[in-house]
Amino acid sequence: MNPPELRLASLAHGGGCGCKLSPAVLRELLSGQPATAAFANLIVGTETGDDAAVWRLDDATNIVATTDFFMPMVDDPFDFGRIAATNALSDVYAMGGRPIFALAILGMPIDKMPTATIREILRGGAHAAAGAGIPVAGGHSIDSPEPIYGLAVIGLVSSAALRRNSDARPGDALILTKPVGVGIYSAAIKKGALSDDGYREMIGVMTRLNAVGAELAKSEGVHAMTDVTGFGLLGHALEMARGAGMTVRLRLDDVPLLAQAEALVQAGYSTGASGRNWASYGEAVRLPEGLEDWRLRLLTDPQTSGGLLVACDADAAPALCAKICENGDPHARIVGRVEPGAPVVSVAR
């Protein structure tokens, strides 16, 4: 009799960026931590919740450093490795940079997982890194109760190309480069409710590099970027609003969705992280009266290896959006704007 097939996601209590601590818990943990202002060359630290740290080497060149890791949201180990690595690489692209090498972060329940399965996770990560043109040059591994994998990524960004999440300007348009709904799909996977087409769609989105961020940063009309991950579209838009001290207005009907996301969320599929995200926003998110709960769960849905949220000159936005679509993100849409006002997110239908 053959042994039962290992379900990778069953070894973890959560998966993907849905594992992230909620924004409120993270703010509490970081409060009172030592200030980084004394380090003059650290030009991006923890102040605005940006995607990566940036250290100035000289007037023209900066190092970008980030780390990202999580537990599996899919059962295929190669796919898990690809997703985790693509997600980690995204932080460098969101700063306008390009990665140069990565280090693996690996924690595995050695007594529960075959060595061959762990090798497939590592192979998937190396495959994603190779797609970005970089090596996984080493790393660190531990025996842990649940499977964990990700990368620490080092990149370079010129001073001219550096883009923070906090530099949006009044009048900017907002572009979202990938569709929303990954957390909803992952909830459906756990209950066997996602079709094969849906799985292929999800993997295609999550393993597509956000390398377009490095190209967008060459445009003076692009002012700010961040990637949309575990805090959901509302959470990352709120970080942009707070960083800039501006109001972010989102148009609900313009937010691109994975093909089955609306049907699945209406059928009751969503993650616990969606509710934690909403509870963390407080009164800083304003919704239209009578908004259905399922629509709210789309906006709070934790994304894994999600798209970039880009603030740019409104006049340049249509051409930039078209460029993003041509570069392999056909769902890219203009989803809102930035206005003077309180640092909140306001949602309209």
Image (cartoon, rainbow, N blue to C red):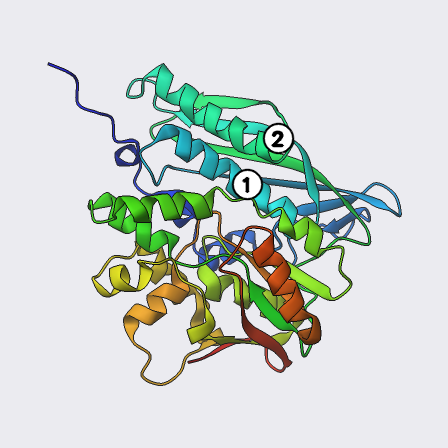
The residue under label 2 is: 102
**Image check: 281 left or right of 36?**
left
Q: Secondary structure at mark 2?
A: strand
**Image check: 76 left or right of 220?**
left
Quadrant containing the N terminus is top left
Residue 11, visible in the rendered structure? yes
Residue ID at (40%, 43%) = 203
Mark 1 Cα-neighbour bin, 10 Å: few <14, some 14–19, many ≥20: many
The residue under label 1 is: 88
* Vertical position of residue 193 compared to residue 294: above or below: above
**Image check: 165 left or right of 301?**
right
Residue 134: image quadrant is: top right
Residue 32, visible in the rendered structure? no
Residue ID at (82%, 54%) = 160
Count of all numbered marks drawn on residues in the image? 2
Residue 345 in the image: state x and y as whole percent. Answer: 51, 74
Q: Secondary structure at mark 1?
A: helix
From the viewer's side, name the closer residue of 263 and 250: 263
Residue ID at (33%, 28%) = 145
Mark 2 Cα-neighbour bin, 10 Å: few <14, some 14–19, many ≥20: many
Residue 256 in the image: state x and y as whole percent. Answer: 44, 64
| Residue 277 disc label | none
Q: Earlier in the sequence, mark 1 or mark 2?
A: 1
1 and 2 marks in contact (CB < 8 Å): yes
